Amino acid sequence: MAPDPAIVPLRDSPYAFEHSAEETERLAFQHAVVSQIIGGRFLPAIDNFAVNAEFRILDCGSGSGSWANDLAFALPRSTVIGFDMHSIDIEFAAPNVRFEIIDANKYPFPLDDSSFDIIHSRSFSFGITDWPRYIAELRRLLKPDGTIHFIESVFPELVEAHSPHLCEIYKLLREQYNINYYIGHTLENLMPDAGLTAIIVKSFTFTYGPYGSTDNERRIGELMRSLTYDGARTIVRAYVAFKGLSEEEAKPYYDDAVKLFEVSKKVPGYIKYVVAAITC
């Protein structure tokens, strides 16, 4: 079974998700669902932006570009710069948004010191290999009175106990690239070493399936289960391509993704929101 050329092989990149039209669509869907969980399209702490604000805003790991483009339309006098490790093409792009190709694991970024009022970093737990270095780089780019907004999933620690084949993949990511998919649990503790202070730490709860107490919670839970399951299958697909596994050999890995969500429906998930500012 030859590796799929549409998938970024694990050995070439720490980011296990493929760069494809399907993945871009999943990321746009993720943006919409996470926005519902945190209660705002952009950032919970400052979602009511003044339309005439003149900010310089950096979006790290823009993915589909949806967040950066939507914000640029909402703030027409601001400048929004997004980056990712691949080009981002948006059919109806705002005139005040642009996208750069930057690898979040190669420092320094080709951006000026103290040049951004707001920095947004979301869903990087499967992409960053050195979190202290990454946070320090964002600190370099931040204006003295600016803020960095981290939004990361806090995954239940279920993989090791219930999904041995997924555990094999995650172990490879840890050992080969130092990927810490549980970074959401302790993210705020990394701020002081970068000269930052976590001024807001908040968790938003959701379920992996239709198990909430309200119709809206159940709807969001169903969306999160679908979204996260698709993400798990994407990681498995990259690993299967990397290993050149046959369909029969790959089946236990896909079965593990299903098994994990049968267990996780009993355990809540969290979105961790950390806002950091330069320590005075």
Image: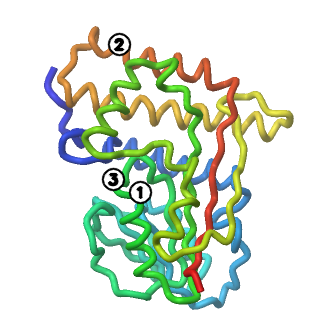
Look at mark 1 in the image and give the residue it sits on.
63
**First along the sequence among labels 2 and 3:** 3
Label 1 sits on a secondary structure element that is: loop
Can you say whether 262 is above or below 141 in the image?
above
Image coords of residue 146 (percent x, y): 56, 83
Camera sees residue 275: yes
Location of the N terminus by quadrant is top left
In the figure, residue 44 lies in which quadrant? bottom right
The amino acid at mark 1 is Gly
Furthest-top residue in this view:
248
Can you say whether 153 is above or below 236 in the image?
below
Label 3 sits on a secondary structure element that is: loop
The amino acid at mark 3 is Thr
Q: Which mark is residue 251?
A: 2
Left or right of 243 in this view: 266:
right
Q: Which mark is residue 129?
A: 3
Q: Nearer the viewer, residue 156 or 53?
A: 156
**First along the sequence among labels 1 and 2:** 1
Q: What's the CA distance linking mark 1 and mark 3?
A: 18 Å
